[in-house]
């Protein structure tokens, strides 16, 4: 049964529509009912409908729901999928030669971006340099930023002083000659053809009399432009999303573009604000968390209203304040045990699972025999810089993994993947005839580093510092740009912080790598009876009966690195809102700070405050506050901020 807001959307006449669908408001249900209505009452054929989703999983769910409403055969006539798959199937594959490929034979798709392609082009180039160039290309191309904005030049292979634009030209030649394609290329080439070929744009756009864009707030500039260009013929498009859940600016998503559909492109505005997931007491916290964004006028003002009316709805969520993270973790463990053995009902949603609390939680859960799965912690652990640190540590601890040597040898001058494998075949013996002369001294230094670390394996922090110094020197030798060095430093420093409370190097590696079996399927959607530890970003679109959000301190929500950028602070606000609105029945917030340093996104009038500090401790905190001790905190970009 459709509610009043959903019915208005479903029965809306053809035209340009922006639907702001709040958390838990039945967005997908409304979309499939709209498709059914368009087929039955607006005389639009299934083959004339294009439905674009953000993920394959969302596309499959939509296909299943639509098939139940209109039948499997009719549903198969529609195009339902990601924008990547649409561009690939409908724009690239029919005419690959248009883009410069030598044949129309299906290209090989590289899921890991430009890095492996550049490795093929420049097999002897330092791997760090390859990674940086690949990352820069992905960033600029996916955001449609002119490559001329990047002024750095690179000496790579036989090329000297190559700009990013010059490198892209060589990359494209290599791709076209070898039929290579990346996911980024699918969007870039799709956008470029629609932008430049007006005849083709009109032809393709005329096929789709209804275009539906799901999770539109997560699209980047080119993705948004693609769907707008396709809708020019029939002007019948529905963009569905939630500005309050736009949390992917780091991927290029632009919430201002999403809201601009209403203000600039004259899309008619519809709202879905009835929440079928959470109690009102939980939604009140979620609504209040957006207050600063509402006041700044950067989001559409709305209030989520709970459809659930059970007695529990008046119970306020708890905010529990502790002296330190060890007490915080003990309480979290205690609450999980009280809840019972339905572990899959519980999610611990962190700002980052790589923070100190995220790290300490895992051994505590293991020690208490509470099964869990970590989600959203793979990215930084799979960073090549961190992998190399693990490789050095593993070798220093006496493990002779050939793959570790292969990983490290490729950092050295004149050694590519083939050469590194050839050299590694002989280890622990070293065949110097196989080693390029210019790499001999670097190998000597690397072997000495591993030997030095092996003597201090009971001091993990010192081992980290030795690796850090060696790796930074190596980056400088490879002429890594200053801005890129800052990013590398930040990644390694995150790991360094996690080593603070661990002495033994072997234990440190084990804890930092976590349990690989838990990471093989990095997915929150699991049938296992396990507690989920997840980043809020990875939890988006999901729900649990009991949600715990730890670290609700001012320096975490908003994160200290977001200062003083206003757009970053606004996104931090939305991240917290997304976390809160994952909870169905029970929400617990925890913090380790004075009350005045609790996250500004929490309205203390809306929570049941449980302060574990004694009055004496509170008095001591006040005395400390009077001294106004200032500490300097270094952000990701190197700037310094002073905080109380």
Image (tube, grey):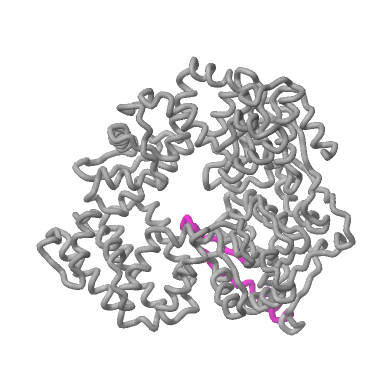
In magenta stretch: residue 634: yes
Q: Residue at x 57, y 76 (%)?
A: 366
Q: Residue at x 65, y 26 (%)?
A: 46
Tell me where residue 59 sits by quadrant: top right
Tell me where residue 423 sits by quadrant: bottom left
Residue 193: where, in percent of width, then height? Answer: 45, 24
Q: Which residues are magenta?
A: 618-644
In magenta stretch: residue 372: no
Q: Residue at x 69, y 22 (%)?
A: 44
Image quadrant containing the N terminus: top right
From the viewer's perspective, is 253 left or right of 494? right
Q: Residue at x 31, y 32 (%)?
A: 176
The residue most toward the top is 199
Residue 292: where, in percent of width, then height? Answer: 72, 50
Check the image and report above or below for 3 versus 312: above
Q: Looking at this view, is 203 or 359 the one in front? A: 203
**Residue 619 visible in the current orientation:** yes
Q: Looking at this view, is 187 or 246 the one in front? A: 187
Residue 602: where, in percent of width, then height? Answer: 74, 60
From the viewer's perspective, is 291 left or right of 634? right
The residue most toward the left is 433
From the viewer's perspective, is 506 left or right of 360? left
Residue 79: where, in percent of width, then height? Answer: 58, 31
**Residue 553 visible in the current orientation:** no
Q: Looking at this view, is 407 or 63 the one in front? A: 63
């Amino acid at each position: 049964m459709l509610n009043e807001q959903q019915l208005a959307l479903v029965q809306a006449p053809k035209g340009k529509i922006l639907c702001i669908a709040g958390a838990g408001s039945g967005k997908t249900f409304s979309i499939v009912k709209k498709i059914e209505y368009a087929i039955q009452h607006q005389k639009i054929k299934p083959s004339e409908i294009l439905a674009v989703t953000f993920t394959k999983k969302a596309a499959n769910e939509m296909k299943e729901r639509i098939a139940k409403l209109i039948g499997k055969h009719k549903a198969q006539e529609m195009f339902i999928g990601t924008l990547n798959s649409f561009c690939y199937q409908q724009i690239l594959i029919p005419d690959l030669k248009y883009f410069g490929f030598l044949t129309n034979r299906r290209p090989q798709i590289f899921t890991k971006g430009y890095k492996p392609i550049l490795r093929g082009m420049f097999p002897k180039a330092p791997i760090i340099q390859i990674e940086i160039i690949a990352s820069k290309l992905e960033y600029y191309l996916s955001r449609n930023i002119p490559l001329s904005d990047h002024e750095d030049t690179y000496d790579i292979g036989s090329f000297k002083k190559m700009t990013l634009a010059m490198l892209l030209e060589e990359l494209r030649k290599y791709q076209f000659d070898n039929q290579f394609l990346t996911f980024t290329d699918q969007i870039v080439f799709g956008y470029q053809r629609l932008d430049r070929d007006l005849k083709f744009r009109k032809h393709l756009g005329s096929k789709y009399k209804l275009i539906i864009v799901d999770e539109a707030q997560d699209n980047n500039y080119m993705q948004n432009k693609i769907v707008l260009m396709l809708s020019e013929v029939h002007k019948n498009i529905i963009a569905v999303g939630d500005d309050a859940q736009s949390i992917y600016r780091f991927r290029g998503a632009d919430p201002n573009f999403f809201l601009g559909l209403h203000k600039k492109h004259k899309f008619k505005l519809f709202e879905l604000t009835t929440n079928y997931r959470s109690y009102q007491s939980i939604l009140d916290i979620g609504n209040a968390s957006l207050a600063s964004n509402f006041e700044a006028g950067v989001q559409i003002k709305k209030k989520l209203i709970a459809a659930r009316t059970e007695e529990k709805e008046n119970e306020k969520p708890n905010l529990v304040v502790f002296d330190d993270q060890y007490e915080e973790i003990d309480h979290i463990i205690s609450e999980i045990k009280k809840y019972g053995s339905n572990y899959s009902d519980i999610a611990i949603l962190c700002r980052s699972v790589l923070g100190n609390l995220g790290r300490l939680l895992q051994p505590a859960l293991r020690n208490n025999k509470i099964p869990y799965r970590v989600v959203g912690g793979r990215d930084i652990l799979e960073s090549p810089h961190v992998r190399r640190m693990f490789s050095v540590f593993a070798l220093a601890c006496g493990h002779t993994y050939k793959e570790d040597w292969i990983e490290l040898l490729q950092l050295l001058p004149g050694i590519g993947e083939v050469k590194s494998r050839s050299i590694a075949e002989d280890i622990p013996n070293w065949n110097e005839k196989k080693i390029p002369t210019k790499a001999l001294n670097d190998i000597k230094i690397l072997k000495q580093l591993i030997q030095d670390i092996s003597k201090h394996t009971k001091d993990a922090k010192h081992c980290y510092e030795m690796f850090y110094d060696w790796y930074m020197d190596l980056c400088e030798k490879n002429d890594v740009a200053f801005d890129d060095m800052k990013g590398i430093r930040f990644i390694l420093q995150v790991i360094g912080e996690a080593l603070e409370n661990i002495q033994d190097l072997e234990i440190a590696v084990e804890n930092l790598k976590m349990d690989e079996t838990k990471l093989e399927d990095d997915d929150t959607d699991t049938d296992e009876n396990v507690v989920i530890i997840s980043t809020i970003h990875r939890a988006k679109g999901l729900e649990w009966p009991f949600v715990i959000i730890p670290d609700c301190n001012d320096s975490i929500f908003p994160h200290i690195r977001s200062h003083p950028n206003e757009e970053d602070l606004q996104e931090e606000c939305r991240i917290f809102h997304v976390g809160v609105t994952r909870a169905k029945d029970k929400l617990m917030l925890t913090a380790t700070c004075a009350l005045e340093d609790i996250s500004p996104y929490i309205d203390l009038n809306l929570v049941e405050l449980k302060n574990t500090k004694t009055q004496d401790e509170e008095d001591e905190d006040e005395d400390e506050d009077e001294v106004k001790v200032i500490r300097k905190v270094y952000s990701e970009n190197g700037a310094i901020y002073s905080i109380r």
